[in-house]
Image (cartoon, grey):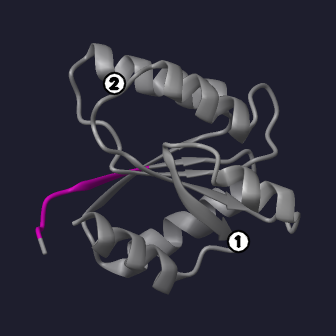
Amino acid sequence: MSDSKLNLLVIDDDDINIFIIKKIVEKTGFNIDMIARNNGQQAIDYLTDTISQNKPLPSLVLIDINMPVMNGWEFIEAYEELSIEQKVDMYILSSSVYENDIEKTKGYKTVRGFISKPLSMERLTELIKAIR
């Protein structure tokens, strides 16, 4: 496993969830730079700026569904329109228990899966190991 820094983008409007994920990231012991944005539009703006500055894109993106301004589904659609060629592992991270949300996840080519909140350290470790 490489010791290179992994960029993680968390898109969630709940600051408590962001705080919890940050603590989980710290406990994994991996070299992770976590960036959080509170809605899909902020995340699209961040990615657009990152691309224009030739900075590394996130390797892993965790996306909440229900957010103001631009929700998770709208973010994914806007992301796919950016035509980013670099492989980015994206997962829906949601408290939704609706089967249609889980099924809808499968309809997006850029989304690798659905994770139910709360995120566990074990699950995050699995995701990181799969990337490296």
Residue 132 lies, in percent from the top left, at: 21, 66
Q: Is residue 119 left or right of residue 9?
A: right
Q: Residue at x 40, y 22 (%)?
A: 83
Q: Nearer the viewer, mark 1 or mark 2?
A: 1
Q: Which residue is drawn at 34% across and 69% down?
A: 128
> Residue extending furthest top?
52
Q: How far apart are marks 1 and 2 (CA)?
A: 28 Å
Residue 82 lies, in percent from the top left, at: 45, 19
Q: Nearer the viewer, residue 114 or 100?
A: 100
Q: In this view, does 80 lie to the left or right of 29?
A: right
Span colored in magenta: 2-8
Q: For the residue marked with disc 2, what is the amino acid?
A: Thr
Q: Name the residue under label 1.
A: 116
Q: Which of 37 and 74 is in front in this view?
A: 74
Q: For the residue marked with disc 1, what is the amino acid?
A: Ser
Mark 2 Cα-neighbour bin, 10 Å: few <14, some 14–19, many ≥20: some
Q: Mark 2 points at which residue?
A: 50
Does the magenta-highlighted stretch encompass residue 27? no
Residue 120 lies, in percent from the top left, at: 57, 81
Q: Which residue is drawn at 29% across and 63% down?
A: 131
Element marked by disc 2: helix
Mark 1 Cα-neighbour bin, 10 Å: few <14, some 14–19, many ≥20: some
Q: In this view, does 25 lie to the left or right of 20?
A: left
Q: Is residue 115 left or right of residue 127?
A: right
Q: Nearer the viewer, residue 69 or 83?
A: 83
> Residue extending furthest right?
98
User: Which numbered disc flags the more N-terminal residue, 1 or 2?
Assistant: 2
Q: How many marks?
A: 2
Q: Which residue is drawn at 35% across and 27% down?
A: 84
Q: Is residue 39 above or below residue 117?
A: above
